[in-house]
Image: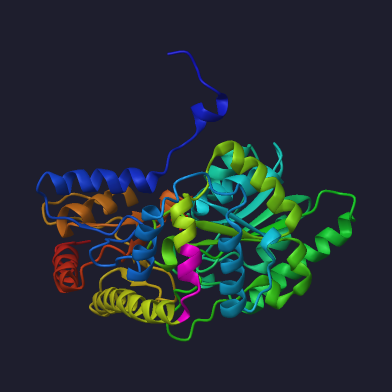
Amino acid sequence: MSPLSQMAETLIGSEIVKLGNAINERIRQGETIYNFTIGDFNPKIFPIPAELEKAIHAAYEKGYTNYPAAEGNLALRQAVGKFIQDREGLAFSPDEIQIASGGRPLIYALFRVLVDKGDKVIYGVPSWNNNHYVHLTQGEHCLIPCTPENDFMPSPADIRAQIKDAALVCLCTPQNPTGTTLSAAALKEIGEIILAENQRRGPAAKQCYLMFDQMYWTLTFGETVHADPIGLNPAMKAYTIYIDGISKVFAATGVRVGWALGPAHVMAKMKAILSHLGAWAPMAEQIAVAEYLGQTQAIDRYLLSFKQAIALRLNGFYDGIMALKAQGHAVDAIAPQAAIYLTVKFDLVGLKTADGLLLADQAAVTDFILREAKVAIVPFSAFGAGKDSPWYRLSVGTAVAEDMPKVMANLAQALGQLKK
Ligand SMILES: Cc1ncc(COP(=O)(O)O)c(C=O)c1O
């Protein structure tokens, strides 16, 4: 076949979606597999808020089926502004808010607004999809390999080392895939690094911006507190774009309403790009979300039980993995902090299975866990980490609580057969 664009020919689709679909196909064919690969929710376990669902139905019944405003309906932008003001203490006016059909089109539009071909984009690995957005915009990948010692977050020193002439720094906290968060101290320092770099360049030069993906920011557990870059450095308001929305906060990944918050001139350009893509959130959903965001008590009630159910699963798997570690197995985990993800380690390369098969590399380990324990998880290599990384993302959005003892028993049984 004749070639398509160079960009398209070299684009990699989402490896996580591919893996999740392959597992689901095997489940459809009758196999029992505990599929913890997809960063999504099983709506039977985690439905969207009942009030939101009702409001969506009502909006369709009232005939809200025409085009929404290109920047998002004013009522929704006002509701988002109030929600963020009340819950994060940040002030954004409607012209500093852009609505789209979820976080993805907003991220794509933001990259298109800020990143020219060859521009430096700084991001840590593992991280969610930054590599693909850099590819789509033909930017220069400035990767920061992150380590468990830093909870897999880029450190200020890592950012400082790459910041010269960068167009964009990408941070995500709470982070997909790790479920970890960036500390306020680190975020404050990173803000100072960006501000100092922009001062060095001067106002006539292209500035460095921060994409601050806080898609999971309400889902923090225990002592963990979500830090935000503008609260820590008010001057960062001129250079920060928040990516946010209802997908994860209200288990509403299929409803498709997201928002970006940032400088008005950046929002205006994103609006122009999004209007060509037509990636608006549907009219009825915008009407409904605007109404729902005003229902403070309903939201508090929803978040309380939603977060409890997620924490139960994250803590259950964490305790199970730590028990296996205490028994001497080469596994580990990072204590849950936030989001719907647990970071787990299966350091099994070099061991042999009961039938003498050598686990020669990490791909063999992933296959082994799937084959012997019937547990499907995503290796960090799917998020840009090295192929030999022993770390995995375990997503609990589809986890049935009653299955957890069986999952841990399967893992114990599989690990128990391994020999040096
Ligand atoms: C960190 C992060 N940002 C953005 C998104 C995109 O969200 P949406 O489903 O609203 O496009 C996701 C989805 O998985 C995510 O994990």
If the image is split into quadrants, where does the C terminus sit? Answer: bottom left
Q: Determine the main secondary structure of the stretch shown in magenta.
A: helix
Residue at 47% x, 63% y: name it: 289
Image position of 403 (left or right of 305) = left
If the image is split into quadrants, where does the N terminus sit? Answer: top left
Where in the figure is residue 9, as x and y percent of width and height? 50, 26
Indicate whether residue 295 is drawn in magenta: yes
Image position of 336 (left or right of 268) = left
Number of marks drawn? 0
Given the current orientation, which residue lies at the most extreme bottom position? 223
Given the current orientation, which residue lies at the most extreme front position? 62
Where in the figure is residue 108, as x and y percent of width and height? 58, 45
Image position of 289 (left or right of 368) = right
Q: Which picture quadrant has residue 182? A: bottom right
Q: Which picture quadrant has residue 178? A: bottom left
Report the span colored magenta. 289-296
Q: Nearer the viewer, residue 218 or 93?
A: 93
Residue at 33% x, 80% y: name it: 305
Where in the figure is residue 349, as x and y percent of width and height? 31, 56
Indicate whether residue 292 is drawn in magenta: yes
Q: Nearer the viewer, residue 365 or 7?
A: 7
- Color theme of the render: rainbow
Q: Is residue 229 above or below residue 105?
A: below
Where in the figure is residue 217, as x and y percent of width and height? 51, 71
Q: Nearer the viewer, residue 114 or 325?
A: 114
